[in-house]
Amino acid sequence: MNSDSRQDETSVPSREGLRTELVGRAIALQPLLRDQAARGESDRVLPVEVVDALADAGVFRLLTPKRYGGHETDLRTLTEVSEALGEGDGSAAWVGMIIAVTNWLACLFPEKAQEEVFGADPDARVTGVAAPMGVGERVPGGWRVSGRWPYNSGAPFATWAAVGALLKDDGGAVVDQVLVLIPASELAVEDTWHTAGMKATASNTLIGQDVFVPDHRVLSVPAAAEGSYPRASRDEALYTSTFGPMLLLCLVGPLLGLGKAALNVAVEAAEEKPLSFTVHGRQADSVGVQIQLAEAALKLETARLHTYRAVDEVDQAAASGGPLDYAARTHVRARAGFAAQQVLDAISTLLNVHGASSFADTAPLQRIWRDAGVAARHAGPVPAVGLEVYGKSLLGIGERVSLML
């Protein structure tokens, strides 16, 4: 056995130990998140107490480099933590996940950009919108960028934003699709997030007008999608993780937690809740209820199995130093969408079990249902796109329908 192999083996327990600790912290936050969920929904923003608790638990630093005081964990840890947080509150889990993964994204930029973000502020919180809703025009030393970027989750808590733009040459032709890093202080926030679910994520619209972005704060999305990042080469495996799968799979963690929360509510209620207009004094005594609970539990298990198998593939590829190939990336995207749909199907079954009382304003199931319904419709895990790209890959059809792979 060579020295590199011995080093890998000795590092595994430490990494797993840190994961266990961080997931434990997330579980410990669940009572607070449940207690504050209704308030966050009413105010349409996470309470300060919740944001501070997420920060204190190390959630925002999950994927920040150790050299800046972060935990520098992996996608598995992020997913397990966001699943645990999702059991308490979907919005809190979503905001924690978004900031953590966008901090990772910022570390794909050149060292100068990383230093600007994290060097001056190890607690920097990056949020972002990948869709190319902005336009950049060439100016000396960089680009002049303008745009409107909706659905920026965690906008009130961000210190930086990574937003999508199309770069144009002097003739107006698009030369690249990019992500640009902009200080949050240089962007306005418009209150546009009025939704049925995930209300406390405050996913409002960022607005920039003629913002100067230097060249070192520009990341080519087509290049990144193929594993080419402008960051300096360092012994930091996390930042070799495959671009699309990293940004897609992270979205499923909060959904897994919401599904688990729904199952817990339905199972606990079935122990005492009568099955109206039947001979059953408890739902738990009904074979029909038993079957439906089992089906829902298996759908959630299916979602977890698909998600974590894909997550582990991403982490293993990063550890080996190479990105996943295109076929593997299409498979990941298909599984992300399939897992999200399994969670939605399970929650629908659990609503049928629990009945009309699920929709009382004070019932947690109706908020879980709304939060999951909104989260699962994020463009990333939309099942139809995942199935299309995976089906094309299986058939050897070379048409690329998305860069987010």
Image (spheres, rainbow, N blue to C red):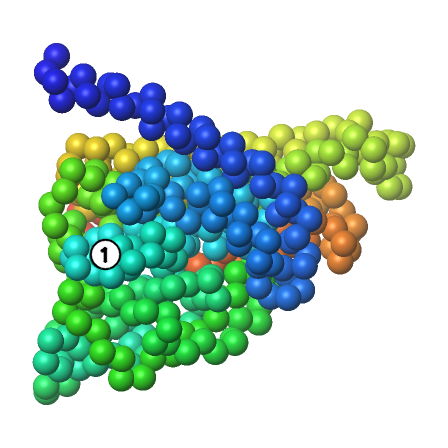
Q: Is residue 2 above or below residue 230?
A: above
Instruction: Classify residue 15 as left or right of residue 366.
Output: left
Residue 316 in view of the camera: yes
What residue is drawn where x is 40% and y is 25%?
Answer: 17
Task: Judge whether 267 appears above or below 141 on screen.
Answer: above
Q: Position of residue 157 (x, y in %)?
A: 46, 62
Q: Tell me if 252 is positioned left or right of 362 in this view.
A: left
Element assignment for label 1: helix
Front one among 93 and 270: 93
Say which residue label 1 marks: 114
Q: Image quadrant of residue 307?
A: top left
Q: Quadrant of residue 205?
A: bottom left
Residue closest to the eye, 326 or 118: 118
**Residue 335 in view:** no
- Crowd class of label 1 (few under 14; some 14 to 19; many from 20; radius 10 Å): many
Residue 310: x %, y % from top left: 33, 37
Residue 208's x, y, as percent? Answer: 34, 79
Q: Residue at x 29, y 69 (%)?
A: 182
Q: Amino acid at mark 1?
A: Gln
Seen from the viewer's position, the closer of residues 355 and 188 is 188
Please tell me whether residue 218 is drawn above or below residue 108 in the rendered image. Answer: below
